[in-house]
Image (tube, grey):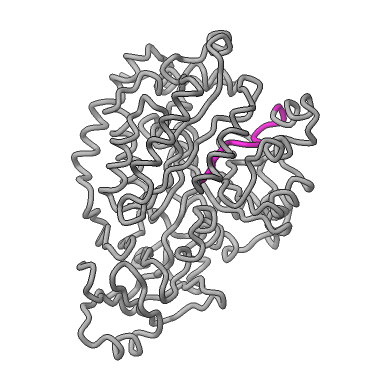
Amino acid sequence: MSAVSTMIFTHGTILTMNPSREIIADGAIAVSGGRIEAVGRTEDVRDRHPAAGEVDLSGHIVLPGLIDTHVHLAQTMLRGVSEGKRLKDFSNWLFGRIFPLQGSYTEADAAASARLAVLEMIKSGTTGFVECLLAGRYGFDGIAEACVDSGIRAALGSLVMAVSPETRDELGWHHGMWQTRESSIAQALDAHDRWEGAGEGRLQVWFGCRSAEPACDLSLYDEVSELARERDMGITIHLAEMPSDNDFAHSLGFRSHVDLARGHGLLGPRTVLAHCTVAGGEDFRLLADTQTSVSHNPANNASAAWGPAAVTDMLAAGVNVALGCDAAPSNANLDLLRDMRVACHSARQRAGTRLAIGPETVLEMATINGARALGLGDSLGSLEPGKSADFITIDTDAPHLQPVWNPVATTVFAAQGQDVDTVVINGQVVMRNRVVLTMDEAEILDDVRGRFRDVAARAGVTGLESEWPTV
């Protein structure tokens, strides 16, 4: 679609997510120059744009593009490696399996994994995401270029860490996943200088902080938070994941792991905290007061057997809670449509009532809350005139999607990533009729098929296959 011509997408059921949360039964969206010009009934929008080209979306549900606020791009090529010989302890899994595999990547391996992740996200309706930990060995430029070329929105968290060589060796930390404090900060700032705002503003560069844990020099976060404020950079970090995180915070005199983050300047409207499964009431008030966002990762948490986060309590306290798929070794898919229903089910199960949360709230988490987490709440997350034209369509012509009594419930509880037909990002049609127009799907899949076993052999990691015999 030309950047200056007007195109109208007609006859869809539009979930506007506007302040009134209006649903337009026979709706149309007019798009020009990357922005939404009009949203309304098809007849009215057509009358105002008689010369516009038209895309017929009859039978489709149209909604804002989904935003995944916690992704590990480099782990997508490690899909399923947690389910061969299962490791009970998280640290054994991380240091004995995941780090050796990722630490053995070449830049080409990391780029292949990133392209696979972006392709999967686009095909399942994700139009923007937050990457949490891009290590230096992955080659930031190649991954940033892949994101820009694909048309997706991305906040790429460049890894910053402060772990001494002595602690690294004591823990058995793979050398390929280790950087000095100075080099990691310098790489993040350099990436920000060169890539911030690339792709017509679609790309952001953030600080991707390693967890605030005993292995880390916590003064790193004071330095990073100050740099982030100076540059208006985003920050993302895993926080309050496990009880040991709160224990560590208590040992330093803090009330909780969230309070520790506050003490080192990490909280604020440009920060996204991943998980917060062991955060509590006082934490929620602190997060709301500082306008800090939380990325809830329900499917990953269930797979890892971590207790479900108190999502309804966070929302009730005014916390901006968004959704994330996390990583393929544990969650297996980057399908946020699927994970919306997991979020709803897990919250209801935790509360012991189906009244705990509804599909409307979960859809808000995946759209407008995600936009706020990206710092783009004024320009994304709803379908309104003047906002960026980021939207997806779900083709309901399928047995598992009929009949459509309630399009919100159908989207959250019945739709799957494979039902996404059309993806528009910044006014560009990135996918139509399930064909991604900005990426070579066959080439990406062939590339990954030829790589993943080589990575495992290079890393010397075993126990990745099924426990059942392969003959």
Q: Is residue 468 visible?
A: yes
Residue stretch rendered in magenta on the structure:
234-244
Is residue 235 in the magenta section?
yes
Q: Is residue 199 left or right of residue 320?
A: left
Q: Measured from the top left, where is residue 86 in percent x and y?
A: 52, 22
> Residue drawn 40% across and 14% down?
461
Q: Quadrant of the C terminus?
A: top left
Is residue 87 in the magenta section?
no
> Residue drawn 23% across and 27% down?
450
Q: Measured from the top left, where is residue 91 in percent x and y?
A: 58, 20
Q: Is residue 328 visible?
A: no
Task: Tell me: residue 62, above or below residue 321.
Answer: below
Q: Is residue 222 left or right of residue 45?
A: right
Q: Residue furthest front?
A: 230
> Which of 50/359 is in front?
50
> Which of 220/29 is in front?
220
> Residue drawn 74% across and 29% down?
249
Q: Measured from the top left, where is residue 322 in percent x and y?
A: 56, 53
Q: Is residue 240 left or right of residue 199?
A: right
> Which of 228/449 is in front?
228
- Counting the numbered discs, the total is 0
Q: Quadrant of the N terminus?
A: bottom left
> Which of 328/2 is in front?
2
Q: Measured from the top left, where is residue 306 in percent x and y?
A: 64, 35
